Amino acid sequence: MATAHSVDKAEPQALPALAPYDEMRPGDGAVRPHYAALEARISTLSAAQLAERQRTLERFFLLQGITFTVYGGETTTERIIPTDLLPRIIPADEWAKIESGLAQRLKALNMFLADIYGEQQILMDGVVPRDLVLSAPSYRREMQNLFVPHAAYANVCGSDLIRQPDGAFAVLEDNLRVPSGVSYMLANREASKRVFPGTFRGAGVRSIDRYPDLLLSTLKSMAVEWRPNPQVVVLTPGVYNSAYYEHAYLARLMGAPLVEGRDLVVHDNMVYMRTTTGLRRVDVIYRRVDDDFIDPLTFRRDSGLGAAGLFNAYRAGNVVICNAPGTGVADDKAVYAYVPHIIRYYLGEDAILPNIETFLCREPAQLSHVLGNLDKFVVKAVGASGGYGMLVGPHSTKAQQAEFADALKADPENYIAQPTIQLSTAPCLVDATIEPRHVDLRPFILCGDKITVTPGALTRVALKRGSLVVNSSQGGGSKDTWVLDGDARAIRP
Amino acid sequence: MMLARVADSLYWIGRYVERAEHMCRLTDVMLNATLDRTEAANQVGRIALAAVGHPDPAKVADPYEAALALTLDRDNDGSITSSLASARENARQVRDQITTETWERLNLLYLRMTGAGAARAFSDGSSSFLGEAIADLHLFKGAADATMSHGEGWSFLMLGVHLERAQLIGRLLETCFGEGRTTALSDHFALTSLLRMSCALEPYLRVFTADIQPKFILEFLLLDEEFPRSIRFCTQRIEEHLSAVNRHTEVTPPANPERLAGRLKARLQYADMAEIQAGGASAFLANVLDECAAIHQALYEAYVAYPLELRLPA
C-alpha cells in the first residue's frame, strides 16, 4: 500500500528494551489457543506444500490484476503487493475491545471536527491549544460553519493500531483523510479462503463481505434528504494512482460509477457527470483524491484531478463530499497527542484504546526532555509524512542529533517525539520457512448516520527480518486478518 | 446511461481486441505461406505486410523477423502485444464495468504475451503461439458475451469490434483489389491465403465450393449476409448496436451515426456485384472505408466528445 500519507511510525531499534509480543507463541514453544487450529494445519504441511499454496495465492492476485505497474525504461512489469499466506488471528474478546475503542475514537473525532469547524468550544475551553489547530496545514478555513449531514466529517477511517510488548493494543495514527487498503483486506480474505478452506471453516471467522454494502449505505446516508435516490460516485485520480485498483474495486462492488475529475462538470453549483446520454446529476462523491486536488478554484490551482467549482457546489449543499475536506486536522500528528483529552471532553469517558506516549516539543518541559534524550526518541516533523523529516534516535549519529537539536530549538512547534516502539510479531512464510515478523493492524471504520466497525483489518507486515517498517514502499507486505466470532473452536486440520 | 469516458474505453477495448485477433491471423498465415519459397508465397507475404501498413521490401524478404516484430514488438504501436496492452489498459480503466471473468481472460493473455517466456514460445512454435492467442481472444469475447449485461456498455464494446473488423477487412480487400496493386491476384495459393487471413476459407467453400475466384472472394467478404467477417454483416451489427445505444438518449444527436450506419448497410444490402465491378471495386472499397471512418467520427460527436453547451440543463 503506498498511501499518500502513510508514515513510517517506527524504525528498527538496535536493542529492544522488551521482547515483542508474539501473536501466536507466548514463549516456551506453546501456542495461543486461538492459533491452535492454524498451527495444527500448517504443521502437517511440508515446505513444498506451503510454497505451492503461496504460489496459488500470488497467482490469484496476479490474475485479478491486484498489481502495481513498474514502468521501466525497456520493460513494463506488473508486480503484486507481497502477501503472506498465514492469517493473523484475533480472538473475539480482544476484538470487542478494539471495536468499541475505535467507535469511541471516531465518534469523538467527528465531534471534534464539528466543533473546530463550528463554535470552537474546545479551543475556548483550552483543552486543545488554539494555534495548534488553526495553524495546522490540514485545517481548512473554507470548511468553517458549513453544514455536514449527521456532523459526520470523516466517513471512512482507517486507524493504525499496534500491539505493545505487554499485549495491549494502542493507536499509532488515525487516518481520516483518504485511507486506503480496504481492498487488500477484502482480497486477502478471498485468497485465504482458497488456501486454507478447511481451517477457515472450522475457525469461525467473522465475515467482512458486507463492507462495500455498508460503505454504500454510509455514503447514501450522507445525501440530502430531498434527493430520494442519491447518485453516489467514486472519484479517483485515475489509472496511474497506486491505489487505482482499490478505487475500481470499490466502485464495482458498490455498483457506483468510477469517475475522474474530467468526467465531472459543475454548472450552477450542481455537479454532473458526462454520460453517453448527456449530463447526469451527482449527489454524493466518495473522493479518493486529496483535499488539495479536489477543486482548482478553491484549493491547488494546478490540480487537474478535481472539478472546478466542486467546493462551491458542496458549500451550496448540492453535493456531498466524503470524507469532508479538512478532516486531516483531526489526524494531525500534534493533535494526536490530545485525542485522549478530546475523548474525555466530548464523551466524558476514558479512551478505551490508549495512545502511544507522545511528547510535544512546543511544550518547553517536554522539549527539554526530548533534547536530553535524542538518542532514544523517534522525532517527527508534524507536517511531514512518508518518513521524511524524521530522526530515529537509536540509529542516528551525534551529528544528526545535533542537527535535529538545532531544528527543534528553532521551530519546536513543528515536532513531536515518541519512544521507539516494538511492534508485535506474527508467523509469516519467508523463503519456505515460518518465521516471526513485525505487524501492525489497520481496521476500517465507517461513519454516516451510524458508526460501523468491520470485523476484519489489513495486517501489514514488515517482511525484512527485524524490520519494524510495514510500509509497502519499504518492503512491507500484508496478510489476511481473521477476527473470530467466539472462542477458538475444535481443531479441524 | 454510462460515463462517456467509460463508453469510449469499452469501444476501444473492442477495437484493440479485434485488431489483435486479425493481426494474429495475418501473421500466422504469412509465416505459414512463406515456408515455401515460391512467388505466390512472396505475394502472400507482401499482401499481409501491406495490409498492416508495412509494405517494406526488406520486411518481405525476411518474413520471420517481420512476424516476430508484428507479434511482440512493444515499440511498434501496431503489434499484437501493443494492441493487447492497449486493450488491457482500457479495461483497467473501466475495471468496474466489466465482469471479473472477462477481465481475467484479457489479463491472462496480456501477462502471457508480455511475460519472459513469450519470445521463446514464439520461436518454439509461432503457429501454436498465435493460435493460442486467437483462442484466448475468443475466450475473452465468449466470457464477455456470457457474463456481461447486454446493455449499453456491451453495445459500445461490440461497436468497437465490428467497426474495427469492417475496416480491417476493408483494408485487406483494398490491398488485394484496390488501385495500387501491382499484379492481379490469381494464384490459387494466394487466394486461399487471403481467405485464411479473413478466417473465411471454410465458410466460403460452403457457399462457393472449391471454385476459388477473386470476384467471389470479393463478393463473399463484402456482401455475404451471414458470414461474421463480411463488411455487410459488420454494418448490420453496427446499426443494431447504434440503435440500441440511441434508445437511451433523449435527444437525437446532431451527428447521427445510426443514420450513416443504416445508409452503409443498405448500400451493401442492395449492392450488385456486376455494378461494383463495372464501377471499379477500388472506388467502392474506398467509399466503404470512408463511410466507416465517418461512423466513427459521428459516434464520437454523439456520445463521447459532445459539446457541453447543448446538454446543460435549462
Image (cartoon, grey):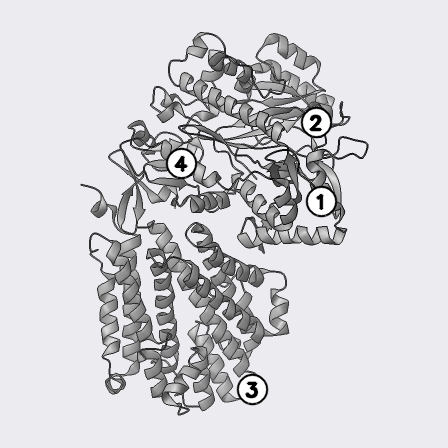
Per the image, the residue denoted by label 3 is: B36
Which amino acid does the dot numbered 4 rest on? Answer: Ser
- Res A288 seen here: no
| Distance of label 2 from label 3 (alpha carbons) | 71 Å
Work out whether disc 4 and disc 1 sit on a shared chain: yes
Mark closer to the observer (4, 1)? 4
Instruction: Look at the numbered disc 1 and give the secondary structure of its residue.
Output: strand
Contact between marks 4 and 1 (CB within 8 A): the answer is no
| Distance of label 1 from label 3 (alpha carbons) | 55 Å
Per the image, the residue denoted by label 4 is: A217
Front residue of this view, candidates A285 and A261: A285
Mark closer to the observer (1, 2)? 1
Contact between marks 4 and 3 (CB within 8 A): the answer is no
Q: Chain of mark 4?
A: A
Front residue of this view, candidates A162 and B17: A162
Which of the two labelled residues, at mark 4 and mark 2, occupies the earlier sequence position? 4
Label 1 crowd bin: few (<14), some (14–19), many (20+), radius 10 Å? some
Per the image, the residue denoted by label 1 is: A429
Q: Chain of mark 1?
A: A
| Distance of label 4 from label 1 (alpha carbons) | 38 Å
Work out whether disc 4 and disc 2 sit on a shared chain: yes
Which of the two labelled residues, at mark 4 and mark 1, occupies the earlier sequence position? 4
| Distance of label 1 from label 2 (alpha carbons) | 21 Å
Label 4 crowd bin: few (<14), some (14–19), many (20+), radius 10 Å? some
Q: Residue at x 52, y 18 (%)?
A: A335
